[in-house]
Image (spheres, grey):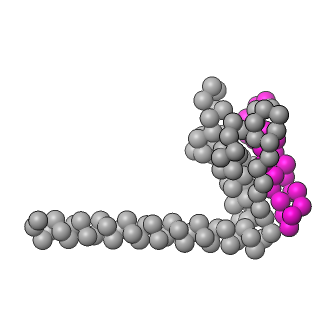
Amino acid sequence: MRPVKIAAVLLFLAGLTAMAVYTTNYADKEKKVERARGLSVEIIDVDSGYGYQILHNNRILIQQDFIPGIQGKTAFSSSAEAKRVADLVVSKLAHNQSPEVFLSELEALQITALNGR
């Protein structure tokens, strides 16, 4: 391999490594902020799927039995989807933002119940 190609590959790998380290550190910092503020998530079973609870110091702050931000009473189809939205809400609360969830955020989180809409 030519020296220029080797340098390009090494630079690319260094960039990937830096991005992985940054992403890991950012996620760790987010969790620390959430814990410091006493926020946690519990996924709950509801009649037709899953919902979530946001707890503050082990007391229910928000109970969400249905997907927020859409019309109707549609539960999450999987616990993983409920967890993704709950984590978004906790992140917003940890940063003193409104816990409101928008359709665009649900789409970005790939919530499957939106596929038929």
> Where 19 falls versus 64 (above or below)?
below
For residue 63: magenta? yes
Q: Residue 28 in the image: x percent, y percent? A: 60, 70
Is residue 99 left or right of 104 when viewed as pictured? right
Magenta range is 51-72
> Where 107 falls versus 23 (above or below)?
above
Residue 104 visible from this viewpoint: no
The one of 26 and 51 positioned closer to us in this rendering: 51
For residue 109: magenta? no
Residue at x-position 41% and y-position 71%: 18
Q: Residue 19 in the image: x percent, y percent? A: 43, 67
Is residue 74 left or right of 116 when viewed as pictured? right
Residue at x-position 24% and y-position 65%: 9
Is residue 39 left or right of 117 when viewed as pictured? right
Residue at x-position 39% and y-position 69%: 17
Q: Quadrant of residue 106?
A: top right
Residue at x-position 45% and y-position 66%: 20
Q: Residue furthest right?
A: 59
Q: Residue 39 in the image: x percent, y percent? A: 78, 64
